[in-house]
Structures are given as C-alpha cells and as structure tokens.
Amino acid sequence: MLEKFSDRLAQDSAHFVMQMPDSPLGDQYATKIGQNAAAKIDRIETVKQQLEDWQQELKEWRRQYGSNRI
C-alpha cells in the first residue's frame, strides 16, 4: 500500500510539474513541487523500512518465544 502511495505521489507531482508555465516562476514552482514530492517519498520509504524491520523482529520473537508453548 505504501508503495502504491509513493508511486501515486510521484505521478501526481510529475503531472503538476508538466502543468507549470514555461517561465521563471513556473520553474520555481516546479522545483518546489519536485522537492516536496521527493521529501515525502523519502519519508514513506523510511516508514516502509521501519515496518519491515518491525515485522522481522516480530517473526524472530514468535520463533524464539512461540516454541516455548506447551
């Protein structure tokens, strides 16, 4: 789900950048849109990695403590 959100964010920002007028102000806005999108995608990737790490920790915990059940 996070991957799809990240992809959608990239597509939307690319669309908005293409809609900007060919002018210095349009270039500034396009740059800002691209930077904001990149920052958001980086945060999404960070959260995605953290979730994967937690999932791995949980699997290890279950493997370690789940085998102690009687």
Image (cartoon, rainbow, N blue to C red):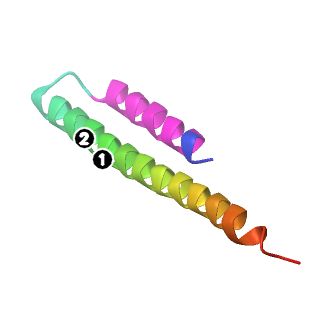
Could you say which is closer to the camera, residue 54 or residue 1? Answer: 54
Which amino acid, by three-letter code, is at mark 2? Gln
Q: Secondary structure at mark 2?
A: helix
Q: Magenta stretch containing residue 8, yes or no? A: yes
Disc 1 designates what residue?
A: 39
Which amino acid, by three-letter code, is at mark 1? Ala
Q: Residue at x 71, y 66 (%)?
A: 62
Q: Which portion, as a residue range, is magenta?
A: 4-20
Q: Residue at x 77, y 74 (%)?
A: 68
For the residues carrying marks 1 and 2, which lies nearer the camera in this image? 1
Q: Which mark is residue 56?
A: none
Displayed quadrant of residue 30:
top left
Tell me how far mark 1 sits from mark 2, CA to CA.
Answer: 6 Å
Establish if 3 lies above or below 48: above
- Residue 18: x percent and y percent? 35, 24
Decide: marks 1, 2 in contact (CB < 8 A)? yes
Could you say which is closer to the camera, residue 45 or residue 57? Answer: 57
Q: Which mark is residue 35?
A: 2
The crowding category of the residue bearing disc 1, from other C-alpha atoms within 10 Å (few below 14, some 14 to 19, many at least 20), is few
**Residue ranking furthest to the right:** 70
- Residue 52: x percent and y percent? 55, 52
**Residue ranking furthest to the top:** 22
Q: Secondary structure at mark 1?
A: helix
Horizontally, residue 59 falls left or right of residue 13, namely right
- Tell me the quarter of the image containing the C terminus: bottom right
